[in-house]
């Protein structure tokens, strides 16, 4: 865990549920909450994509609880929320290619599972539920930067599932008065993100390749750009959103660094950190991918003071040395 200049909340009297807490973003949130003295941090995870390696260091902490279970079971969700004040819902099946290959499972987890958590959270009386939304919701809308109320048509089954989450959040707000906050993540990266498997994200793949001195593949010409977001910025957003003042409706906000980086620039920065000179290999564009992405983050700042503390380069340097030490552990 790194210096966290944005920490201001008193966590000592509050209990938290992190769904998907053994996953990449979820385990980083858990680490933050335990570091700053949360009364209780419970995770719910079925370990379909999460890893025990991400949470082993927490298991001796008396404030930590592990509940192994599936969000597709409503009673499991209800059990997970017993005695909980705040819930950060991170559990999902990520990856555009995964959803293209298996849209039914992505739908079951990301929509039915999300609805179960909404129902259980509404009925349990939690103070706030924040959930992982996605920049994929912008779909084929070409405008830059991306502004929350201007979206296009989804380009993948995964994007559809994350948009449906937002629709359910809005309906629960209007129908039941249960107001949640969705965080539209833009390409989050950092420690504990798994570089292995067919659906690994680009930065851990690039870093692993650089550590091994191997040329990575880049889909397309490498000029595809993304608003890469270091994971500690996403952690900051979750904590600030959980403790935001009263909200009068369902809210969705962009969580990003608000800077574009092309895949070619990304590889060049990583090779600079690694101290190597190695050209990537190029192959065809990937189905369902958006060409460019850049977020407007003003709304998140207005709503709960989100101001990313880590730049892309800061995050790449931290992530590189973490992977160098931990590349074979997950």
Image: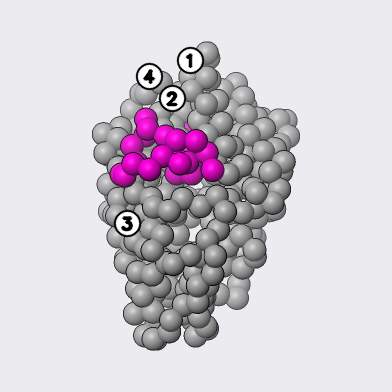
Label for residue 250? 2
Q: Quadrant of the N terminus?
A: bottom left
**Residue contact between numbered discs 2 and 3, judged by CB atoms under 8 Å:** no
Q: Nearer the viewer, mark 4 or mark 1?
A: 1
**Residue contact between numbered discs 3 and 4, judged by CB atoms under 8 Å:** no
Q: Nearer the viewer, mark 3 or mark 4?
A: 3
Is 246 rendered above or below residue 17? above
Q: Earlier in the sequence, mark 2 or mark 3?
A: 2
In the image, the segment drawn in magenta is 128-155
- Reply yes or no: does residue 136 show up in magenta: yes
Is 240 rendered above or below residue 291? above
- Residue found 52% across the figure and 13% down from its top: 175
Query: Circle 4 sits in a helix, a strand or a loop, which is it?
Result: loop
Q: Earlier in the sequence, mark 4 or mark 1?
A: 1
Cα–Cα span, label 2 and label 3? 28 Å
Q: Quadrant of the C terminus?
A: bottom right
Cα–Cα span, label 3 and label 1? 35 Å
User: Badge 4 is on which residue?
Assistant: 248
**Residue contact between numbered discs 2 and 1, judged by CB atoms under 8 Å:** yes
Q: Residues within 10 Å of mark 4 (few under 14, many from 20)?
A: few
Q: Main secondary structure of the magenta part?
A: loop
């Amino acid at each position: 865990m790194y210096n966290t200049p944005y920490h201001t909340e008193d966590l000592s009297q509050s209990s938290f549920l992190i769904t998907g807490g053994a996953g990449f973003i979820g385990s980083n949130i858990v680490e933050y909450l335990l570091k700053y003295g949360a009364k209780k941090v419970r995770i719910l995870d079925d370990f379909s994509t999460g890893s025990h390696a991400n949470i082993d260091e927490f298991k001796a902490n008396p404030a930590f609880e592990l509940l192994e279970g599936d969000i597709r079971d409503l009673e499991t969700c209800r059990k997970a929320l017993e005695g909980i004040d705040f819930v950060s819902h991170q559990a999902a099946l990520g990856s555009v290619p995964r959803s293209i290959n298996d849209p039914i499972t992505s739908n079951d987890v990301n929509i039915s599972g999300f609805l179960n958590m909404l129902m259980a959270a509404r009925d349990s009386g939690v103070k706030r539920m924040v959930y992982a939304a996605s920049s994929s919701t912008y779909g084929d809308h070409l405008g830059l930067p991306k502004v929350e109320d201007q979206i296009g048509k989804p380009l993948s089954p995964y994007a559809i599932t994350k948009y449906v989450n937002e629709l359910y959040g809005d309906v629960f707000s209007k129908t039941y008065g249960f107001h949640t906050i969705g965080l539209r993540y833009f390409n989050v990266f950092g420690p504990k993100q798994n570089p292995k498997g067919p659906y690994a994200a680009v930065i851990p793949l690039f870093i692993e390749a650089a550590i091994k001195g191997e040329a990575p593949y880049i889909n397309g010409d490498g000029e595809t750009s993304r608003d890469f977001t270091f994971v500690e910025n996403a952690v900051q957003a979750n904590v600030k959103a959980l403790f935001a003042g009263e909200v009068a409706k369902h809210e969705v906000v962009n969580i990003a660094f608000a800077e574009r980086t092309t895949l070619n620039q990304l590889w060049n920065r990583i090779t600079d950190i690694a101290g190597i000179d190695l050209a990537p290999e190029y192959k065809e564009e990937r189905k369902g991918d958006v060409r460019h992405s850049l977020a407007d983050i003003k709304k998140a700042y207005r709503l709960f003071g989100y101001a990313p503390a880590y730049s892309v380069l800061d995050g790449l340097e931290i992530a590189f040395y973490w992977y160098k030490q931990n590349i074979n552990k997950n």
